[in-house]
Structures are given as C-alpha cells and as structure tokens.
Image (tube, rainbow, N blue to C red):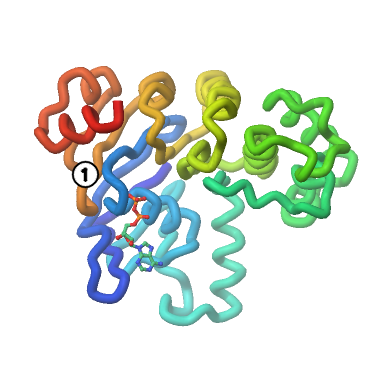
C-alpha cells in the first residue's frame, strides 16, 4: 500500500530522513515509536503531501506519490489537482483536532464527502451518523464542537477522517493534547476501529499499551533511521538495541 524508496528529507542542511526504505502492506497496522525529533511526524506529513521529499520516491497503492508532474519545486495548478486527488486516499488525524468551529458535529463529518467526493447530502448524513455512532457520539450530531470535551472532539475528527473512506489512516500523536482522563476513550475507539476494520493504519504514538494492542509491527526510529522493527511482543519484550531498551524504559 505504501512504499518509501530511498527517501531523503532535509530542512535546510538538517537531514531528518536519510535514505529511508520502508513499506506498509494493505491492511497492515504499523506504529512508529522513538525519541522526539527522530522524524516520525515528518513521515506522516510526507505521506499526506504536507511536505515534499528532497530525494527518493513514495509510492501509494503502486503509484508514485512524491514526484509530481510539472516539477516538484513549484506548485503549478496541475500539481494542486494531483495533490488533491492523492490526499483523498489518505485520512489524517492530528494532535490538535482542527474541527470547523462554526459547523455542527455532523456537518464536520459530511462536509468533505459532499464537496470532495460528491455524495448527496442525504448519503453523507447517513454515513456520517453511522460513523458518529462508531465513535460513540450518535447523540452529538447537532452539537457544536465547542460544546464537546477534547476527547469527544478528537473522536469527531476520527469520524471525519473515516468519512472520506481513506485507504490509509494516519494518526499523529492523537492523544497528546488531551487531559489524561480523556485519553482512554479515544484509544478505545481507535482500538475498535483497528481491530474491526481492514484499514491500513500508520500511527505515531507514545501510548505503548495502545501500540502493543493494535500493531502488527512496531518500528523504532532514531535519527531518521529505522533502528529495529518487529511484532510488538518481540520489540517490547526483547529489543535488540540498547537504544531501544533505553527509550522503552524511559516511556514505559
Ligand atoms: P518526531 O515526530 O519524531 O518528533 P519530527 O518529524 O517532528 O520528529 O521532526 C524531525 C526533525 O525535523 C526535528 O528536528 C524538527 O525540528 C525538524 N523539522 C520538522 N519540521 C520542520 C520544518 N518544517 N522546518 C524545519 N525543521 C523541521
């Protein structure tokens, strides 16, 4: 579903990702862990086309994703269209929920399916209600985001991402901005989605219990490299690298 082929990402002369190769199979759930600043979020932002690769290629569903027609230094109109088309396949949930504050909860979830996918309002609303039910907010369709807790807002953001029927769901530290008592509710919803659907999931998190429950594979990053990767039991119980052991003992 996803393949990074010798991807280099530099900001100025700071090399954040250095010839990174990695892949994600369809339906696979992968968690990226590692110290702050090691390049995990940059991987998600590259996939979401919020950043561009410096060198190398990213393939999504077999198509090159990062070498955009018309050159990659300037955003020409053709590129904007290309980017929009590609972004539709990928849903991303951020640390900050970024809901539309002036729209009701259901409208937040139906806006993109109506305007981007071209669904009728009725179709989008029906699907939106199903998704809000899935995240435990069926009774909040007519509320405004400001009337919800942070955890509830994040669950709306998850429903909104799923409403676009993405091939891949990217989760970027989605519980980091929440009060501690709201974290479990959001993780429970994500655990349900991960275990009851076949969506491909790439997740950056400091929640090691969650990583262990949902991941097929955990990848430990350090300085833009994959230090080691494996099934959660292996990586958490018997890490090979001292650096991984140190990191895990600091966060667990
Ligand atoms: P992580 O998610 O592992 O904490 P990030 O991918 O956010 O790491 O960041 C990796 C490195 O890239 C950090 O040193 C960060 O400062 C740098 N970085 C990220 N985005 C930018 C940017 N837009 N401009 C300059 N440096 C950036």
Q: Quadrant of the C terminus?
A: top left
The one nearer the camera, 7 or 135, is 135
- Residue 73 coordinates in the image, percent (x, y): 42, 80
Question: From the viewer's perspective, is 159 left or right of 226?
Answer: right
- Residue 236 coordinates in the image, percent (x, y): 24, 22
Query: Which quarter of the frame holds ligand 1?
Result: bottom left
- Residue 40 coordinates in the image, percent (x, y): 34, 48
- Rendered view: 74 above or below 113: below
Give the image quarter of residue 68. Answer: bottom left
The one nearer the camera, 32 or 63, is 32
Question: From the viewer's perspective, is 162 left or right of 32?
Answer: right
Q: Judging from the image, what secondary structure is the residue with disc 1 in?
A: strand
- Rendered view: 61 above or below 178: below
User: Residue sitting at 45 percent across and 56 percent down?
Assistant: 45
The one nearer the camera, 97 or 75, is 97
User: Residue sitting at 88 percent across and 45 percent down?
Assistant: 121
Give the image quarter of residue 160. Answer: top right
User: Residue sitting at 47 percent across and 73 percent down?
Assistant: 69
Q: Residues within 10 Å of mark 1 (few under 14, many from 20)?
A: some
Determine if residue 192 is in view: yes
Label 1 belongs to which residue?
226
């Amino acid at each position: 579903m996803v393949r990074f082929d010798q991807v280099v990402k530099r900001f100025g002369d700071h090399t954040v990702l250095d010839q990174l190769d990695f892949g994600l199979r369809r339906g696979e759930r992968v968690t990226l862990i590692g110290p702050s600043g090691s390049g995990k979020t940059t991987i998600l932002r590259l996939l979401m086309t919020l950043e561009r690769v410096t060198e190398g290629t990213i393939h999504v569903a077999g198509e090159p994703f990062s070498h955009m027609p018309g050159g990659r230094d300037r955003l020409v109109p053709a590129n904007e269209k290309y980017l929009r088309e590609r972004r539709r396949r990928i849903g991303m949930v951020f640390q900050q929920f970024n809901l539309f504050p002036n729209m009701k909860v259901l409208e937040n979830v139906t806006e993109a399916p109506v305007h981007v996918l071209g669904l009728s309002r009725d179709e989008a609303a029906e699907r939106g209600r199903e998704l809000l039910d899935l995240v435990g907010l069926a009774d909040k369709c007519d509320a405004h985001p400001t009337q919800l807790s942070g955890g509830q807002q994040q669950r709306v953001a998850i429903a909104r991402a799923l409403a676009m029927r993405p091939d891949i769901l990217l989760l970027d530290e989605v519980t980091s901005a929440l009060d501690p008592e709201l974290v479990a509710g959001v993780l429970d919803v994500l655990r349900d989605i991960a275990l009851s659907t076949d969506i491909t999931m790439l997740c950056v998190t400091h929640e090691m219990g969650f990583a262990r429950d949902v991941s097929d594979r955990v990848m430990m990053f350090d300085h833009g490299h994959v230090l080691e990767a494996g099934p959660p039991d292996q990586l958490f119980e018997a890490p090979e690298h001292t650096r991984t052991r140190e990191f895990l003992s600091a966060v667990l």
